[in-house]
Image (cartoon, coloured by chain):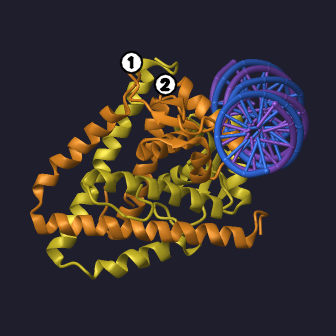
Chain colours: A yellow, B orange, C purple, D blue
Amino acid sequence: MAQDGTGQRGEDLGWELSTAVVLFHEAVAQRLGLSAADHRALGVVSRAGSLTAGELAQRTGLSPGAVTGLVDRLESAGHVRRTRDPADRRRVVIVPVSAPGRPDLSGIFRDLGAAMAGFGGDYDEQQIRAIQDYLVKTIRVLREQTRRLSAEAAAEGPGDG
Amino acid sequence: MAQDGTGQRGEDLGWELSTAVVLFHEAVAQRLGLSAADHRALGVVSRAGSLTAGELAQRTGLSPGAVTGLVDRLESAGHVRRTRDPADRRRVVIVPVSAPGRPDLSGIFRDLGAAMAGFGGDYDEQQIRAIQDYLVKTIRVLREQTRRLSAEAAAEGPGDG
DNA sequence: CCGAAAGTTTTAGTGTGGCGAAGTAATAGC
DNA sequence: GCTATTACTTCGCCACACTAAAACTTTCGG
């Protein structure tokens, strides 16, 4: 199989990209001292900008107790901070330590971005637009399919159908 | 920033794509009654066509014992089958099965592929080449960064350095 | 056929992470 | 101010998946 042979056909490219992304994600997670699941939760927090522990429980589908442990790990690793909601001080607001949406996690993504920007110069403007358009559409399709899969899974039940 | 707005800048697109891929991956896994890790292993098997347990252990980085459990789960879920290598009957050859009556991987990916192919027609040949080139390079960079991250993590030590 | 080696499975031990329930702190109602 | 409710945290238990080591089966060499 294509160990380094980076692709010939579109389908293969999709698979390779998917695998590469997943492995990258896991490597990042490990680098951050997190499991893949915790990394994803961190992504949820980062994307939301800030949310309460209860909301995080809802979004991740975890129990309140599990969220405490999750936030503990994230906090002790320095990726989020617990704050009290000034209005309702029972609430614990979880805020990511770095910028929302695109956490500049220890410069890892900066390196990646730099590398990608580096070969960005290889394309003319029209090609760049095509690439961006493609990425946008791919992301949209992935999200749609993800939503569909989740809905199907919920409909068919958690048992093995 | 880009909460659902699917991207304006390249860096954001990278992040969004990454997240979308990971979530898609997990959704597929859940749909198949597998963990994300097992799903990735199944991907390795599917892509290889068939391989021995030992090879799978090597490629996933798992111990032989863990592979037994992994293959057990995959097999009981109906996604692979164990076969004996006729030449060396010590070897267990793992072959993927397109599980009948089970949620079908290929169906999911066919939909995805169709969607992606659907907007593939929006581009001329030169743009398609650019996109493919971009994907190839992105995959390469992701792999490089993954390798680097793993190396760094190993160097800094598993402790909370 | 016997012993060594290779490949996989089994077993015991461990660590992680989740759920559920009780506990603690804060808000709302009386 | 006291009680009920809400929100998070702590605690006990358990399921899962991994590693390491022993066991089992098959193959190869003498």
Percent of width and height locating residue A43: 52, 54
Residue contact at pointers 2 and 1, CB within 8 angstroms: yes
- Location of mark 1 (residue): B101
Q: Quadrant of residue B137?
A: bottom left
Foreground: B69 or B5? B69
| Residue at point 22%, 72% (across, down) | A128
Camera sees residue A68: no
- Location of mark 2 (residue): B78
Percent of width and height locating residue A121: 28, 82
Q: In which quarter of the image is residue B105?
A: top left
| Residue at point 50%, 45% (across, down) | B40
Please give left or right for residue C3 compared with residue B160 in the image: right
Say if labels 2 and 1 share a chain: yes
Percent of width and height locating residue C19: 68, 26
Please give left or right for residue A117 compared with residue C22 in the image: left
Q: Please state the chain letter of the residue tagged with numbered disc 1 in the rendered image.
A: B
Foreground: B25 or B66? B66
Q: Which of marks 2 and 1 is nearer the N terminus?
A: 2
| Label 1 element class | loop
Q: Quadrant of residue B96?
A: top left
Q: Please state the chain letter of the residue tagged with numbered disc 2 in the rendered image.
A: B
Percent of width and height locating residue A49: 50, 56
Camera sees residue B54: yes
| Residue at point 27%, 38% (across, down) | B110
| Residue at point 37%, 51% (across, down) | A15
A95 w.r.t. A146: above or below: below
- Which amino acid, mark 2? Gly
| Alpha carbon separation for disc pair 2 and 1 | 9 Å
- Which amino acid, mark 1? Gly
Q: Quadrant of the N terminus of chain A?
A: bottom left
